[in-house]
Image (spheres, grey):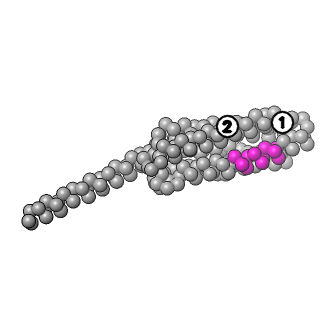
Amino acid sequence: MNKKLAAALSGGAVLAMALTGCGDDKEEKLDAWAKQVCDDVQPQAKKISDANAAIQEQTSDNSSPEDVQKTDSKAFGDMSAAYKAIGSAVKKAGAPPVEDGEKTKNDAVKELNGISTSYGDLKKQIDDLDTDDQGEFADGLKDIAGELSKISKSGNEALEKLQSGEVGEAMKNQESCKSSTTSPAPSPSGA
């Protein structure tokens, strides 16, 4: 009888160790996924931050409409490319090893690509503004500022969703994610 009990207990211990091992394996896989995404996102986050800084530096008070247009156009193009690259990084990493991982990945990629397209549209809008007409240019910047505010909020929400739950915890532990913070997008120069 004692042998059967000992065998049952040792069998239970083996099962417990196996379950613990699975948890560690899942955690390791999630950490590896997070590291890959964070490493790929870090340079893109810097591009977004640099683009935001460029927009903030260039104001219509001390810059010509041509300079504002040139700076904002480049910044929007850089942001569009950066968000597209972040979407590609998430897609390349595959689904995170969590419940609904495939949906999490697909939703993030779709949102990030949509944000990329929106910044591309802003680039086209700023490029199409008439810099010869100061009033028309200022009105155009106000319209762009409204769109920029929406896109910025959407971009922040997409990144927050991606960085929530187990996935977010794993990402927070990655050095490259700790140092890659994207600041909210500013209003376009002079708007």
For label 2, the residue is 117
Magenta stretch, main secondary structure, is helix
Residue 64 in sight: no
Q: Amino acid at mark 2?
A: Thr
Give how far across and how far down residue 143 sits, in percent.
81, 45
Give how far across and how far down residue 121 sits, in percent.
73, 36
On screen, residue 146 above or below 76: below
Q: Which mark is residue 129?
A: 1
Element at badge 1?
loop
Residue at x 70%, y 36% (from the top left corner): 120
Horizontal relation, residue 134 to residue 124: left or right: right
User: Which of pointers 1 and 2 indicates the residue nearer the eye?
Assistant: 2
- Within 10 Å of disc 1 (Cα), the crowding (few <14, some 14-19, many 20+) is some
**Label whose residue precedes the other's in the sequence (1 or 2):** 2
| Residue extent of the magenta highlight | 141-151
Q: To which quarter of the image does residue 117 belong?
A: top right
Q: Amino acid at mark 1?
A: Leu
Horizontal relation, residue 77 to residue 161: left or right: right
